[in-house]
Amino acid sequence: MNHQHFLIISFRGQGHLNPTIQLAKRLVWAGAQVTYANAVDGRNIRTIKTSISMEGLSHTSFSVTDDDAGEPSSYEDRISEIKRVGSRNLRELIVSLSEKDRPVTFLIYTVLLPWAADVARDLGVPSAFLSIQSAAVFAIYHHYFNSRSGFYQTSKNEPPTPLSLPGLPPLTPEDLPSFLLPTDPNFPIVPTFQEHILTLEKETNPCVLLNTFDVLEEDLIKAGMENMKLFAIGPLIPLAYLENS
């Protein structure tokens, strides 16, 4: 670990920040160097208040929006802008770290940033997707979005069909993440989650880090998802909670 430099990127949402910061701290405690970078809206960038303060862990940010352009006219345009601008600025960040004699040896990216894997691959940097939710939720995404048999490949605008997952009772559409339903106002975000799965399929050795632990979702983790390597690394909560339990 002493020669590893991990770059961890995430959006600034509270549900994104907490687990990624905990992972960053654990990697530092294991002896690695970590740069923690937030993807931010350059039009409305504010000082990021963070409690991160430990040797081996640094903090930065990169914009995922075109600061000189107006607000996108649609959700689809916003997602396109985030991918285009974010990819460019993430590439510049990784190159900049290398020029400072701190080459990134591994990239960890979180939900809503699937294009980060393409940037890493182009630069020859291995990467992993950190699923900040449970293994069950990731399995749902994989079931509906995979290119081989995914429901959304042919029935995007129809209600999702029920499914069965190892270790869980049959799931009806009402049991699924609400944005998967065509009637949900957040349904336009579906292509981004689909891109997560399709991006992982392009990897030679796709790696997924799960915010869970083996005993909790053992059947799902053992069942796997095609050729994806699944690693349960959770729960990603402050170690003080675990030490007192």
Image (cartoon, rainbow, N blue to C red):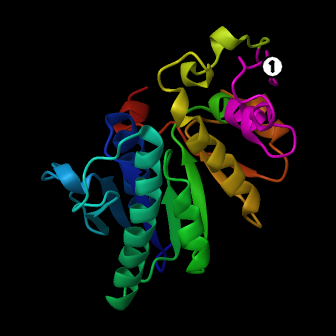
In terms of depth relative to the viewer, which is nearer, 32 or 168? 168
Which of the 4 quarters of the picture holds residue 220?
top right
Indicate left or right for 158 with 188 as reference. right
Count neighbours of disc 1 (C-alpha within 10 A) and say few if under 14, some if 14 to 19, many if 20 or more.
some
Total tally of numbered discs in the picture: 1
Residue 25 visible within the image: yes
Residue 149 placement, left or right of 189:
right
**Residue in the image at 64% along x and 18% along y:** 176
| Magenta span dominant secondary structure | loop
Q: Is residue 103 shown above or below 71?
A: below
**What's under tag 1, amino acid-wise?**
Leu
Check if residue 190 falls in the magenta segment. no
Q: Is residue 32 visible?
A: no
Q: Quadrant of the C terminus?
A: top left
Residue under label 1, please give it.
163
Magenta stretch: give its range.
Answer: 139-168
Label 1 residue SS: loop
Left or right, 171 with reference to 71: right
